[in-house]
Every structure is written in structure tokens, then in C-alpha cells.
Image (tube, rainbow, N blue to C red):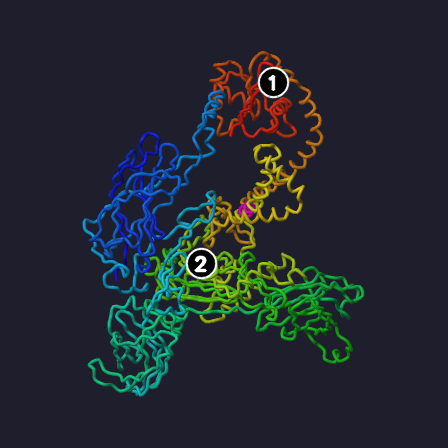
Amino acid sequence: MAAYKLGVEVASAHDLMPKDGQGSASACVELTFDGQRFRTAIKDKDLNPVWNERFYFNVSDPSNLPELALEAYVYNINRSIDGSRSFLGKVRIAGTSFVPFPDAVVMHYPLEKRGMFSRVKGELGLKVYITNDPSIKASNPLPAMDPVSNNPPPTPAEQIAADITGTNLSTTHEHRAEVKTLHTIAKEVQHQHHGHGHLPASFADQPSKYAVDQMKPEPQQPKIVRMYSAASQQPMDYALKETSPFLGGGQVVGGRVIRAEKHASTYDLVERMQYLFVRVVKARDLPDMDVTGSLDPYVEVRVGNYRGITRHFEKQKNPEWNAVFAFSRDRMQATILEVVVKDKDLLKDDFVGLVRFDLNDVPMRVPPDSPLAPEWYRLVHKTGDKSRGELMLAVWIGTQADEAFPDAWHSDAATLEDPSAVTHMKSKVYHAPRLWYLRVNIIEAQDIAITDKTRYPDVFVRAQVGHQHGRTKPVQARNFNPFWNEDLMFVAAEPFEDHLILSLEDRVAPNKDEVLGRVIIPLTMIDRRADDRIVHGKWFNLEKPVLIDVDQLKKEKFSTRLHLRLCLDGGYHVLDESTNYSSDLRPTAKQLWKPSIGLLELGILGAQGIVPMKTRDGKGSSDTYCVAKYGSKWVRTRTIVNNPGPKFNEQYTWEVYDPATVLTVGVFDNGQLGEKGGEKTSSSKDAKIGKVRIRLSTLETGRVYTHSYPLLVLHPSGVKKMGELHLAIRFSSTSLVNMMYLYSRPLLPKMHYVRPIPVLQVDMLRHQAVQIVSARLSRMEPPLRKEVVEYMSDVDSHLWSMRRSKANFFRLMSVFSGLFAVSKWFNGVCSWRNPITTVLVHILFIMLVCFPELILPTVFLYMFLIGVWNYRYRPRYPPHMNTKISHAEAVHPDELDEEFDTFPTSRSPDVIRMRYDRLRSVAGRIQTVWLVQESTSVLLKANMGAAESSSKLAGSIHEFTVKDARGSDVELSRYKGKVVLIVNAASRCGLTNSNYTELGQLYGKYKETGATEPGSNEQIVEFACTRFKAEYPILGKVDVNGGNAAPLYKFLKSERGGLFGERIKWNFTKFLVDKEGHVVNQIIME
């Protein structure tokens, strides 16, 4: 069925309100319908504009059309000043007024007011109709408008001050605003004819119903989601895009699901896909084919060009296969299914018999129906005659929700030459082992026996659990009873297959150790604890590694003993992934687990634009599959062979125990399928394409999030987009009270705070945990390979890089930006920068002093109002990687090379020396900042009194003597009887060009002005005199603020103190001095 669309023709407007101050207006029309927005072109200087532009909106749900409305806003665009827009009027057309295309005519609607005090007039001509012509496509979405500057034009007072002081107002406002361009859509070229569609159910004469899943409109253009400030916005290609797919439960629009009339299945977060399933169970009474009377049977299932083959049995007339084949109905063009039994032969396989099915007669099965019972079918010859033997089959049409789907052979594997590669393509669910921390407290040893009695033994204990090693510090045992009392930590996984091996060793020489005894302790014999209770120690007898003389062994009445405290700590959470992206924070001991607070559902819909990762048959290819991890449950989708836009449509669920966790989804290229149709290569590693992380605390409960996530990967050459991953996510909370209670609890289990583990040791244990998990998952079938587990767990997140250091530094600065803003605001209050604000703060302070019982209510009221104000700016979409915030967009190539360098390094000594010097330079700058802060505080205390007293004793500027740019003394008394303008200038500032030029013009007119300018004195003279031909006096470099400010500037600021404060805010601040030497005005550059 064709999709309905709403067509809108914007014809013209008549008698609009003039808005540009010249008796005219530059009008455009903005159309809004069901979350879609379009805009016409701008008609300059025309009160009766004519557009004749046509737009088409997608109608997501025709049954909901009467509740919708079309809104048309008419704006005046002022492009000559700042690109702002002003309201001219609006038209609102209810959905009940929409008519079919044959009945539509151009209607002139009077423009309505937006508010009570709006002034509008005129009419807008529109033609609105409903159509279902399949040849009509939806219009392009409206591009995002650039933010329009709200800076007002200069006031007359500002213009007069600019004329007096020689300031360029355009330069003054340079830092305030910029003129932006308003994007418009030009007139579209349409077909000369239109489809004569019909009204939907609510408008047709004969009522009929339309289900949502029956309507397939053209997909809307994805919405670009911006979640960061303008300073951190990244390219559109790297941004998150919201989508509105048709899932099993209906269409997702704005996070809500528009339900279909049909009953929704449990797979309601993926698109429903139909498959033809063929289950080949077994055969019986097959005929003899060879001369010897033997038969090597196998089954071939054929549907059109797709062919699936079972394994063959040697000399077996009653074989059992129990194999399932799944063929996608979207790719099938045949109507006949053939199941052929053949005999495996060296030269050519012999035909035994076949069974044919008409696909139109195949039954439909939808879970929770029971599996379809297989049936015996008689084999027939190609001519249709009956043959000997029968084949048990079951054929049905189902969806990906069928229980046979994960283990079935899919038609995607038809192009592979190696049948064994099919095992690496199936979708599976993996459960990582439960991990424990093994704490080994080595207390002491007794009765050490060494061969050399002339020296004291230098002994230590070496411990080993699987591939993990640890050792105590060497102790010189003067009494042959060494004491350590050291803790060694290891990671153990259930079921406990490894043993704890402890050996007591003596260092007899450098790099030479002698084993004095060894003990092997099974991990199953070690006690477990879930709290910090005391574990009692035990003595273990050590066995000598080699027994030479049995009689000598019988004479020995004692042996070396080792005192140990052993326990498996279940009160900790064993970190096996990056701390910032943990998916599970529960302790190991199950008795400490809390009930789940919700359910996380993930629908992996598909991917688009996947970059080819290998070469097959001379062409780029990619065999894509996805891996999702949350908690101890790992899931893997099936592999889609040689498809840059694979469609998975697989759904998985997890129980949620803490909202402060992260879901990780990775995309990989299956390296087990090889480059030549299934033949493995020498490396056969699964290549990394990209991954997506979603923090559950950023999701609204009950809402369905459907977004297309860009797969951004940092390569040695920079950031690269590897494709896009389309996901559907829903987090459902079973108890809101329990979920809110978790936010009041610590993030990690109690043992992490009662008996914390050092950070360095936690990193080492995390590395060991990742190795254990990867080893266990690689033993499953199909294996989840080591490189996949390490990539999903961020095994290299602890490595240092300059890029990450910069990103973390600026993140830290953003955290404290609020404190800096409060400090700046308070400083402005103290300096009377805004007199009204300062007076209000004083009134509030006096009120709180007089009525202290209002302090807490005032604080809570302020917090409440701030929360209400910021509520509309809350993030509505899950955050995604930002290339600007992570400093991945503008990183230096050498910093990238350093980040991808191995550990230990593989670069040349010269490169390492250069990077070391760069690191020293960065550390030196940080050190300089601290030294400057300390020295400044000392100098301020020492010189504050003298500087302030000298400036306050002066009566006018004529009492000061200053230095000029050449170091000569200049007595300001020479300017008695003259008006002087003193300016603090700058050579590298946005105000430099205009101010220097206009100061020269002002000096040429009045022949008297002075200036001071930062920089060395020689550079000041060269810059001002050479570039700007300055003839006015140039004074030397001085400080204008702080404790080291020049006495002249202290006097100038004290003369104009009070409401303006005693601090120069910006460069080119001007002090106008009268003939008596007193400051009469201060012009502050904004």
C-alpha cells in the first residue's frame, strides 16, 4: 500500500505588514507538521510576495491525522544587519480540514496573531491536500538555522562616545556578534502531474482501517542530534542521528511506539523479517548406489540460486542430520523448494531422490507456537516416479524470533567455499565466568634448611596461579625463621581449575635462586568470605622438589613450614573492564546481590556504509558481525557476508542492577572467513570496525531510543568514520523507588572502602581478569576471540597519551567552570561592576542577617528555580563520542604516533628524546604557574602599602614622572593647561588597527595625546611609528592592574573609582584628563 503524504503549495501572500523600516518586508514562510519543518525562499522587499513552491510531508499514522495540524509562520528576514527575523503572522489548519488532491484549491487565509500584543495584517495563499501517489517523494528537511545575533544596534550615546574618543563601533562589537546567513530552500522542480490519492480512514466516505505495520512510508531524513555547546560541536557526519524505523511493535516516533493493530511479539525492538525454515531430520531405507552396495548420503536444499548442504555419512543408509536451513524471503525469487538426497562420490555425486514443495502452501509459524512436527516424505525421481527411501522434513515460514534461528544455516553463507566456516557465523550468547579475588597473606616460615651453613639465607616466597605470578620481598633470615606478613592478590575464575603454587626460594647468587620447598593448594579448598572478617592462618608443610636419598628422607624428623592466610574475597567487584565504562558493579558473592531494578532491551537493527576490511575476488569486502556486552553476558550476532549494509534485526535483554553502568556494542569483521571465499589467512584475526557506548543513567525509563550511531575510530592518521550502527534501546524500570535509592548508595561494594586495594594493583588485576575472560570465551564454540574481548574491555585504557591528558585537563576545567563563574560574579559584585546587582545582593545579605531562618529556604528555592530553568535544556538523547571534546579532531600527528606506539616503545632514540623534551616543557609550564602564584602573593604583601600610599598622596597627574619608550624621563607637568587623553594600548588585539589609526587622526586634529603600550620599548616604538605612522608621545611599558601597577595608573583609577571600580577591564581604556590634571571621564572598551 502506498504511503500517504500531505502536500502543501505555498502560493503567495498579500498586504503584509512592513517591518524593515523602509515600508517593505523580506518575507519567507516556514511550514511545520508532525515534527517536520520546511521553509520557502526569501522574497526581498516585497509586501505581496509570490512563491509557488510545493512541499510534501510524511504522514506517519493516517488514523492520527485528525489530531494533527499544519502551521505556517510568515517571517521577515533582515539580512542587511544581523540576519534576524521578525514575526509577520501565522496560519493554523486543523487536520480535519485536509482534502484529497482533486478537491484541493488555493485558499487565502488571514494571518493570525502570535500573542496579545502582536500587530499583523495580510493573507497567505495555501493549497493543502492528501495524496498517496507512490512517485512523490518527501521534501528535503530544513537545514539547521545558524544562531541569529541578538545584539541591538548602537545607541545614540554610544555613537556620540565613539565620535568623541575615536573608537570604531564595528570593531567594538566584533567580539559580541557576527552576521549569520539564513539558509533557505530554493523552489523545487516538480512533475507536471500529481497522483490523485484518496483520503485516509477518517476522511473517506466508506470507513476502513489501516494498520501501522501495513503502511511503509518513505523513511524520513534522520534528525541530527546536538548535545553539546556551540564550542564543542563536531562535523555533521560525526553526529548522532535519530531514526523512526518500523519495529515489531509499531513505528517509533520521538521515542514512543505507535502500536499496530496486530499483536506485538516479544521481538518488538527489531524489524520483523520472514525466513523459510527447512529442518532435515533423518532418512531411512535409502537405496544402494555403488557396486559394493554402499551409500555416502548427504542432503542438498535448493531455493532458486541458494543452496545449502548437510554433512555426508559414509556407508550409512539410515543417516540422521538434524540440520536447519534458513532462507530470507526478501531475497527469494523462486516458488519451488527442492530437497535433494545425493550420494558422495569422487568424480560426480549421484542423484538418489528429491522432495518438492510449493512455497505458497508452506504453513506460517509464529512463537509461542510449539515447533512444527516433522513428517516422512517419499523420495521421487527427477521424472516424478517414486523412488526407494524416505526423508523426514519440517518446512515452515517464521521470523527471527524462532528458536531454530540462531543455530540455522543461513543463506548468507552460500558464497563460502569452506563449509566449516559456517560455525563461525552463528549468533550466540556467552556468559563470562564469575571472578574472585584470591588474597594470599604470607606471614612467616619456620625451620629453613639450606645446604650452605656458612651464610644467612636470603629467602622469598614465589606464588603462581595459572599464568599469574607474584613474590614477596627478599628477607635475610638470621634465625632461619623469616617473617614477611605480605599480601599477594590474584584473580581466580569459576570453576576453579587452577591451583595455588607456593615455593620458598633462596637467592644464592645474582640471578640464581634455589628452591627450598613447594606446596600446591587447590583453590576449591580455600575458604570464601563476603566481608572483612578475620581469616585464621594455617601451617603448610613444604615438599622438597627433588628427593635423592630415601633413607636420608626417613631420618629427617621435621620439614620446612609456611604460615599462610588464604581466602577468596567475595565482597569486592572484580574489575574486568575500564572503570569509567563498567557494565556491572555487583560484588562476587551472590548473597550480597540486590534485586534487579529493571530490564535493558537492545535491538541491533543493522549497519550502513561499512568500510571494506579485506579483499575477496579482487573487490573490497566486509563480513560484519556485532558483539554486545553488559555485565557477565556477552552476545554475538550472526555474520553477514560481503554486505556493506548488513541487516541483523536481533534482540537481546539484560537484567539491570545499577543504572550507573554502560552498555558496549562493538562491530567487527569476521577474519575466520578469509579473503578467498572462506579460506583462512595466516593471521585470521577479527578486525575492529568500531564500538558504541551507551550509559544507562542517560536513558529515560520506558522510552524507545532509535538512533544511528557513527562508528568513529582513531587511527594513526586521525579520526576515521567506519560506518554507522543502527540500534534500538529501551530501559524499563520495575521499581522507581529502588532505582532512586541506588543513587544514594556508594558506587562500588562496601569492601572497596573498608579495605581498599591500591590503584596500581587494581590496574594489574584488571589486566589479569581480562586475560582470564578472553581465555574462557575463546574456548566456546564459536569462540569469542581474544582481540574482540580486549577491544570491548579497553585493555589499553591505562596507557598514557598527550591527547587524553589534554582532554582530561579541559574536562576538569569545565567541572570547575561553575566555581570560576561564581568567583567572577562575586568579584563583579564587590567591584560594583553592575550597581543594581550589587545593591540587590546587599539587600539580600541584610535580609538574611536579620532573618536567619530564611537562609535554608532561600538556598532551596534558588536550587529549585535553577533546576526548573535548566530542565528544558536537559539532554534528550544518549551522549556519543565528541571528536572536539576528546581532542581527536585536531591532534598533532606525532602525538597520535606516540599514542599508538607499543609498550615498551619501538621508536628510535631521537624520537624518544624529542618526546621527552616536549613532556619536560609541558611539566615546566605547569611548574611555572605554581611559582608565579607563590611569588605574586609575596610581592603583593611587600609592595602593596608603598604603592598605594604614593598614588594617594598625589593631587594631579602633573606631579608624576614617567618613562618614555626610550627610557628617558617625561614629566607630566609639561602638559599643564592642556587636555590629555591617556590610553593603554596593545599591539596584538582585535581593537589595535582601528584604535591606532583613529588615535593618529585624533592627534593630528588636537596635537596632544599620550599612550602606553605593552611589549618591549623598542618593539612599541617600531610597531606604532612604522606601521601606523604615530607622531604622538609613546610612553614605556608599565603594569596597569595588580599590585605592580604603575603609580600613574593607580592615581587614574582612584580618581574614577566608586561604581566603575578600580580595575581596567580591557585594552584601549581611555582616561580623559582636564587642564588641571584631574580625570573627568573614563571610557571602557567593551
Estimate the x, y position of residue 662 in percent, counting from the top left. Answer: 51, 59
Looking at marks 2 and 1 on the same chain, the residue that comes earlier in the sequence is marked by 2
Residue pointed to by mark 2: 688
Residue 1027 can be seen, yes or no: no
Taking 885 as reference, is 399 above or below it?
below
Estimate the x, y position of residue 999 in percent, counting from the top left. Answer: 49, 20
Taking 785 as reference, is 715 above or below it?
above
For residue 243, which quarter of the picture? bottom left
Extent of the magenta region: 805-811
Instruction: Indicate left or right for 1061 with 624 as reference.
Output: right
Estimate the x, y position of residue 128 in percent, counting from the top left. Answer: 26, 50
Q: Are marks 2 and 1 in contact (CB under 8 Å)?
A: no
The local secondary structure at tag 2 comes to strand
For residue 299, which quarter of the picture? bottom left
Based on the picture, tell me whether residue 662 belongs to the magenta stretch.
Answer: no
Q: Amino acid at mark 1?
A: His
The local secondary structure at tag 1 comes to loop
Q: Amino acid at mark 2?
A: Lys
Between the C-alphas of marks 2 and 1, the distance is: 73 Å
Taking 1069 as reference, is 91 above or below it?
below
Residue at point 58% right, 38% down? 825
Residue pointed to by mark 1: 1078
Residue at point 48% right, 58% down? 700
